[in-house]
Amino acid sequence: MSDRKSAVVISAHAADFVWRCGGAIALHQELGYNVTVVCLSFGERGESARLWKEGKTLAEVKALRRNEAENAARALDVHDIQFLDMGDYPLRFTEEAENKVVNIIREVQPNFMFSHSKWDPYNTDHMKTTDFALTCRMIAQAWGHNPEQKVLGAPQLYLFEPHQTEQMQWKPDVFLDITPVWEKKRKAMECNEGQIHLWDFYTRVAQQRANHFKRNSGGMAGGRDCKYAEGFQSVFPRTVDELS
């Protein structure tokens, strides 16, 4: 295990980590973290409409989606990306997959984690992934589970922004300035050629969150400049020694 700080992203489909926390990944890699991305599926059935319309087979779609995710991970300087190939629409959560992810979490010992919103009626794969992530985090903290492994501490779980925020009961309480790494995120987004329609959508989201960053970093007049940001909702309380 590395002495560097670390983070784990649990992504339902192969491109989710790019749109929703690609800036956070690139930024923390630059800050010296090792970020591990776990893709539960390739999004081959439900998030690859363009490829199916082109007449691709299931094997071809999965291969293309994997290649796109690997290229995006390189663009973001991801430390490690792992594919569990669980299938999607719907994702099926097994004890085997649970044990795999718990083992990854215990090996990485993340300082914080990312996953999806708690509610997503448009894509239940997403909200079930967050429930799965919370379950795996809980198991990784259990002293009686594989006691020869190092027990996990209590990393924060940040829920990244869903596609239709207002419908998904997601309320951000953290805004992260990703301006210094924006070009990396945009390059990573452009690796996902099967979802070109999302490139500009998530560019606009980042610009809107930058406005919220500025509004909350000192008020309309005092806030420092920010061109691109990502928003997150934290699950657990923060413990601090001083309020600011």
Image: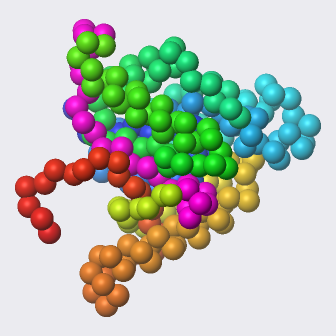
* Residue at the (59%, 49%) spot, across then down: 120
Residue 41 position, x and y percent, is 62, 31
Do we see residue 64 in this rendering?
no
Instruction: Answer with left or right where residue 231 lies relative to residue 57.
Output: left
The answer to whether 151 appears left or right of 127 in the picture is left
Q: Nearer the viewer, residue 238 or 112?
A: 238
Give the dominant element type of the magenta stretch: helix, strand or loop: loop
Where does the image place residue 139, in percent across and percent down from the top left?
34, 23
Residue located at (44% from left, 33% from top)? 133
Left or right of residue 151, residue 44 in this image: right
- In the image, farthest residue toward the bottom: 221
Is 142 contained in the magenta span?
A: no
Q: Quadrant of the N terminus?
A: top left
Q: Give the answer, above or below, for where 205 lies relative to 88.
A: below
- Which of the two residues, 93 or 7, is positioned nearer the viewer here? 93
Whole-percent x, y for residue 233 in the image: 39, 55
Instruction: Read off the magenta span.
Output: 146-168
Using the rendered image of the protein, determine whether residue 89 is visible from the camera's viewpoint.
Answer: yes
Corner quadrant of residue 47: top right
Q: Position of residue 59 (x, y in %)?
A: 79, 25
Query: Residue at (23%, 17%) from the top-left corner?
Result: 143
